[in-house]
Amino acid sequence: MEEFVVLVNPEDEVLGLMEKQQAHINGLLHRAFSVFLFNSKGEMLLQKRAPEKYHSPKQWTNAVCSHPRENETYLEAAKRRLREELGIETELSEKFSFIYKADVGGGLWEHELDHVFVGSYEADFNLNQNEVEEVRFISMEDLDKEMKEAPENFTEWFKIILEEYKHHF
């Protein structure tokens, strides 16, 4: 099934739809969301992207990141992707939004108006292996250390979004 992203201007006004991979080739601004999940110890959930992903395969990133569909709210989309990728449901709260552009390799660009959500989760996962290879919780201190020692193991957008997250909290 072909997936489309919602193209927007910097004020989040809809300009139209475009097939997802084409939007990433063209580097056009589109709607996106990112979810950060934490356990009761304050550790962040990371997911390792599946090897079949067309960009950034087998790299670590935040719990969920994707794109809302046409006429779907950012929150609805975030909750949908939690179910589709991790097989979970949890409450989320939107914390901030910002625009970024990142070269993700292979002639592809992420240029997103990204709405960032935060939640907590403690139970089991039912991973969609087409999307997620594995998950793990990590302390912020250990995450910073790993990202410094092996930045190539993390998605480009996660590096940007994590820095933006730290500025807000």
Image (tube, rainbow, N blue to C red):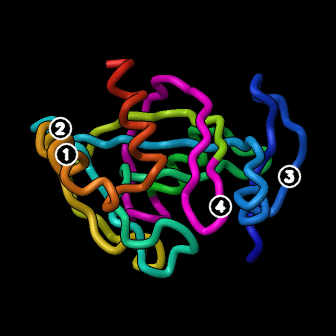
Density class for disc 1 (Cα within 10 Å; few <14, some 14-19, many ≥20) is some
Tell me, yes or no, whether the two marked residues, 1 and 2, touch with CB atoms within 8 Å: yes
Q: Position of residue 97 (x, y in %)?
A: 56, 26
Residue tagged 2: 140
SS at mark 3 in the image: strand
Above or below, 32 against 127 in this view is above
Label annotation for residue 44: none
The earlier-in-sequence mark between 3 and 2 is 3
What amino acid is at disc 2? Met
Residue 46 rendering spot, x and y as whole percentages: 29, 54
In the picture of the structure, the residue carrying the numbered disc 4 is 108
Quarter of the figure with residue 1:
bottom right
- Residue that carries the numbered disc 1 in the rendered image: 143
Q: Secondary structure at mark 1?
A: helix
Residue type highlighted by circle 3: Leu
- Asked whether, in this view, residue 13 is left or right of residue 73, the answer is right
Q: Label 3 vs label 1: CA separation? A: 36 Å
Nearer-N-terminus badge (2/4): 4
Q: Which residue is mark 3?
A: 17
Report crowding for label 2: few under 14, some 14 to 19, many 20 or more residues within 10 A (C-alpha): few
Mark in front: 4 vs 3:
4
Of callouts 1 and 4, which one flags the residue occurring earlier in the amino acid sequence? 4
Q: Say few, some or many: other residues with alpha carbon within 10 Å of mark 3 (under 14 / 14 to 19 / 20 or more).
A: some
Magenta segment boundaries in residue numbering: 83-110
For marks 1 and 4, give the CA distance.
Answer: 26 Å
Identify residue type, mark 1.
Leu
